[in-house]
Image (cartoon, helix red, strand yellow):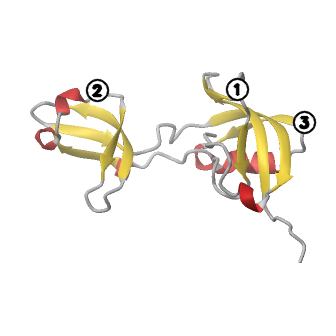
Amino acid sequence: MPNFSLKNKVTVHYTGSFDDGEVFDTTDGRAPLTYIEGNHEVVPGFERAVISMQPGESKRVHLEPAEAYGERDPMLVMTMPTVEIPNYDDLVVGSLIYIMEPETGYQRLARVVRVQDDGETVFDFNHPMAGSAINFDLTLVAREPLESNDENKGDEAHA
């Protein structure tokens, strides 16, 4: 039986920016991003843009929040009494911290929104770029059939 793959290993250089031009991530000056098509390693709009490209091709794409990191969900903004938080005086508004979910034991990333010594602390569990339209300048370096031993060898995807 022939050995073939329905997935591809993709290597791409990119620069991600907000509509005001602020760059939030880039591979400029470092190795390109490598990921496996269809493994949900990059935001949906990034993958859709790259899938139609040929090696050596470059293009710029604009992604609305639904195609990027999603819309902000107000249900993911949560409060808790400050006195119940160990070492709450170490919390810094705007910082990202991991919080253990008591029901599952898993840690979730949250942004500290507000800390009141005698009140409540507010955490936002939305992705930091949720609700933001973003842009990517993309250059496809390579697309190769996935070898069976490559399945989990993609670089950590950020886009």
Amino acid beneath label 1: Arg
- Tell me: residue 145, above or below residue 16: below
Q: Quadrant of residue 11?
A: top right
Q: From the viewer's side, name the closer residue of 105 and 112.
A: 105
Which numbered disc, 3 or 2, marks the residue that appears first in the sequence?
3
Identify the residue position indicated by label 1 in the image. Answer: 30
Q: Are the residues flagged by discs 3 and 1 in contact, CB closer than 8 Å?
A: no
- Horizontally, residue 149 falls left or right of residue 56, namely left
Q: Looking at the rendering, in which quadrant would you find the N terminus?
A: bottom right
Instruction: Give the secondary structure at mark 1.
Output: loop
Identify the residue position indicated by label 2 in the image. Answer: 92
Measured as percent of width and height from the top left, residue 94 is found at 36, 28
Q: Residues within 10 Å of mark 2 (few under 14, many from 20)?
A: some
Amino acid beneath label 3: Gly
Q: Is residue 65 visible?
A: yes
C-alpha gap between disc 1 and disc 2: 31 Å
Amino acid beneath label 2: Val
Nearer mark to the viewer, of 3 and 1: 1
Measured as percent of width and height from the top left, residue 62 is found at 70, 37
Q: Residues within 10 Å of mark 1 (few under 14, many from 20)?
A: few
The residue positioned 69% from the left and 58% from the top of the image is 151
- Horizontally, residue 122 falls left or right of residue 124, namely left
The residue positioned 9% from the left and 33% from the top of the image is 118
Measured as percent of width and height from the top left, residue 138 is found at 78, 35
Instruction: Give the secondary structure at mark 3.
Output: loop
Which numbered disc, 1 or 2, marks the residue that appears first in the sequence?
1
Q: Quadrant of residue 37?
A: bottom right
Instruction: Give the secondary structure at mark 2.
Output: loop
C-alpha gap between disc 3 and disc 2: 44 Å
- Tell me: residue 20, above or below residue 144: above
C-alpha gap between disc 3 and disc 1: 17 Å
